[in-house]
Amino acid sequence: MVDLSIIIVSWNVAYLLKECLTSIYANREKLNIETFVVDNASKDNTCQMVKDGFPQVKLIANKDNLGFPKANNQAIRQSSGKYVLVLNPDTIIRPQAFKNMIQFMEDTSKCGALGPKLLNPDGSLQLSCRTFPTLKTQLYTSLFLDSLLPKTKLFGRHLMGYWQHNEVKEVDQPMGAAILFRKETLDKVGLFDENIFIFSDEVDLCFRIKKAGWKIFFTPGAQIVHYGGQSFKQWQGLKAALRGGYIWRKSRNYFFGKHYGSWTVPILILLDMLQAVIILGVLFLTIKTISSLL
């Protein structure tokens, strides 16, 4: 029986994926694992690199970029592990991470999903847990209060900037860069929502997991290095940035409409407009100040 199915969706990051896969097999310990790489139509040498360097990996090469949920679901449906780890390609597995995560799951029967401790490449903490977004947290974001006061329990509640991630804790949603799911849980609540292309997909799945009565935990006992946002760095230029922002807001609005009601979406649009006004106002004042000094 396969203990752990590892699923990696990759897009044009062959050099990072190679490091990730190397770390997986260096730290598998005695676990019986299977690894899937789902490539979303990369234009680099991702597929060839996997075939040549990691023949044991089950490669799914998509002709088009299907997005994160669909690509993950492709592999999850083929997986046979008791546990499923959804993992970003820009990650490095540290020793004992797999073993400790699975042991936690074995010891905690009501745990449907588990987040490890994520570290930046320099070894510093990467905040990786969130509460589910609400209209209140979106208001704080629109007013930049969560950025200005990230370590307060009021304005920093959603991103949990006040918490040092140094203890086992029940949480709403770990970051999608690395989440371990119990396969039994996925069989009961369903897979990623394929109406989403990217962003908010793990939020939606975690929301459904908790709604179904399962618990979600964070453990500092398993550590994974996460470079962060490497695929998105390919979205260069103003046009790409605007497109990324549009996709993020579309996914967020879908999540709110699905779980909180369609009436919330117009409010989110108004909050986005408020944020735009604030940004333009600050930009105008900055330009005016600079001009007066010249």
Image (cartoon, helix red, strand yellow):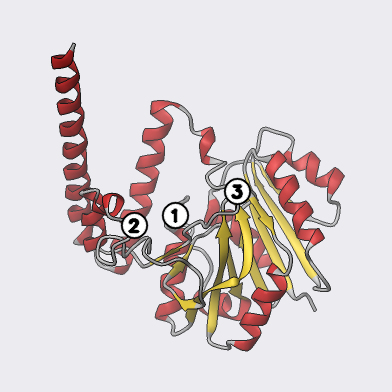
Q: Which residue is mark 1?
A: 196
Q: Are marks 1 and 2 in contact (CB under 8 Å)?
A: yes
At label 2, counting other C-alpha atoms closer than 10 Å, the crowd grade (few under 14, some 14-19, many 20 or more) is some
Mark 3 or 1: in front is 3
Residue type, mark 3 in image:
Asp
Quadrant of the frame with the C terminus? top left
Q: Residue 172, located in which quarter of the rendered image?
A: bottom left
What residue is rendered at 62% in x and 81% in y?
105
Alpha carbon of mark 3 to alpha carbon of mark 1: how far?
Answer: 32 Å
Q: Position of residue 110 (x, y in %)?
A: 53, 87
Residue 254 image label:
2
Nearest the viewer among 82 and 21 is: 21
Residue type, mark 2 in image:
Tyr
Q: Position of residue 95 (x, y in %)?
A: 74, 65
Q: Which residue is mark 3?
A: 122
Q: Residue 277, located in which quarter of the rendered image?
A: top left
Q: Position of residue 250 (x, y in %)?
A: 34, 49
Task: Tell which residue pokes out farthest to the front in this image.
Answer: 293
Looking at the image, residue 291 sits to the left or right of residue 147; the answer is left
The relative height of residue 67 versus residue 292 in the rendered view (above or below) is below
Q: Earlier in the sequence, mark 3 or mark 1?
A: 3
What residue is rendered at 53% in x and 49% in y?
67
Looking at the image, residue 253 sits to the left or right of residue 124; the answer is left
